[in-house]
Image (tube, rainbow, N blue to C red):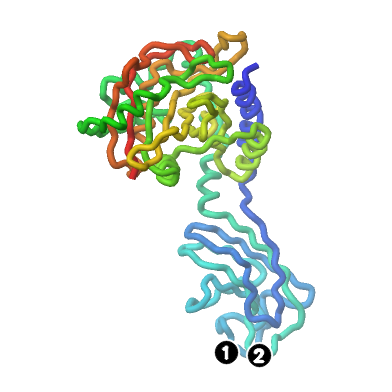
Amino acid sequence: MNRDFFIRLVLIGLLAPALLTAQTSGQDFTFTVPANQSWTDTNLDLKTGDVVQISATSTTCNPQGVSGSSSANLPLPSAPAGALIARLHSQGAMPILIGASQKLQIDEPGHLSLGVNVAGTPPCQGDFSVKVHLVSAQAGSQNAAYSAQDVKQKLAAAAQTWLAGQFGTGASSSSAATTGNAATGSSGSATETLKISNTPLDANLRKAIDGMPRRVNDEFNNQGDMVNFVLIGSQQQMQAALDAANWHVADTDDKEAALKAVLQTYEKKDYLAMPMSKLMLFGRYQDYGYEMAEPIAMVASRHHFRIWKAPFTYNSQTVWVGAGTHDIGFEKDQRNGKITHKIDPAVDGERENIGSSLQKSGKVKSMTYYLPPNPVQDAKNATGGGYHSDGRILVVFLQ
């Protein structure tokens, strides 16, 4: 069985049950608040939209306070002396009565401290055991996204994408892109029409691109995916642009990937870094693999590319050479009869998807097409799957 296929099957088995059974309880913290100490810092930063449930118990003191005691100079004069109180800001705002239990809706960023409503000698000796249950605004939105019904819908959508890829029933994501119109991405929304510069590439850059390999290869020198885009900019610029464009760096360790997928799922986070196989260009494996897909659907379908640092520069700038394809299912590896991933044969759609995502990121100076000598227009990848292209390379200058 092909390595990529096996990994995806494992992740299907791990992710789906985890997503369907993940709890939405937030985070729990426990603190000891001395009755004779003004404030105890919880080290919890709060964000707008967070929900905080606080409860307190004590064997010696009443968290509700002592009725009938003097209220002079108390931090919260409206509450009994000795009551448990909270402060959401370091200074300025009036403390909040917690007592035995209180639920707080956070309407502006703050920092939680716990204290006792005392001035001078406390009305009792001892401390409070305080439990804080925090549901962050981010976790709340993710919890909503991870309802059982939504998970089922996402799994169903992934299955439809997979079946369309298997039997050729789905519309090609690149059928419009190669004619200059908008292409359809994994999320179903149309990609932006690329703003292509009419300025010809510098002769030195054209010469460097002309000398590049046209295709990547596997470890057995079987030629595979075509080189279809070039990024020009520093490593920092490249990584910042791809991060802003919502591309995710693929994990490189299979075992760690499976563990990370489960942990992130139970933490209400999407796992978007599925490993990809290693291919070669310039005599070495890719420097980075990047991917983009809807959560869960990534198991069956994803946009992805491999990228290499070129052995040459342009105007003292680093040149990055990439090969991008869109996985749409699985098929038989014609080299050995095993199962492997299947790509959308109209590979120009992925070139346009990469360009469109970078364009939306605001990290692009300009981009242009370049048709090199001996362009790749009709070929097969290393596993025997056919693909076609207009042969152009998208050259992107980064900010």
Specify whether residue 302 is in view: yes
Q: Nearer the viewer, residue 367 or 25?
A: 367
Q: What kind of residue is marked 1?
A: Asn
Q: CA distance from mark 1 to mark 2?
A: 9 Å
Q: Which of the 4 quarters of the picture holds residue 326?
A: top left
Q: Are marks 1 and 2 in contact (CB under 8 Å)?
A: yes
Q: Is residue 140 left or right of residue 235?
A: right
Q: Nearer the viewer, residue 114 or 274?
A: 274
Q: Secondary structure at mark 2?
A: loop
Name the residue rendered at 58%, 44% in the picture.
Answer: 268
Name the residue rendered at 55%, 44% in the picture.
Answer: 143
Q: Is residue 398 left or right of residue 151?
A: left
Q: Is residue 377 left or right of residue 137?
A: left
Q: Which residue is mark 2?
A: 120
Q: Which of the 4 quarters of the picture holds residue 146?
A: top right
Name the residue rendered at 66%, 90% in the picture.
Answer: 120
Q: What kind of residue is marked 2?
A: Gly
Work out whether 29 lies above or below 209.
below
Q: Secondary structure at mark 1?
A: loop
Q: Earlier in the sequence, mark 1 or mark 2?
A: 1
Q: Which residue is mark 1?
A: 73
The percent position of residue 211, horizontal first and vertical second, equals 38, 24
Work out whether 211 lies above or below 75.
above
Q: How many marks?
A: 2
* Image quadrant where one finds the N terminus: top right
For label 2, the crowd category at 10 Å Cα-Cα, with few meaning under 14, some 14 to 19 and many 20 or more, is few
The percent position of residue 61, horizontal first and vertical second, equals 74, 77
Specify whether residue 294 is in view: no
The percent position of residue 207, horizontal first and vertical second, equals 32, 27
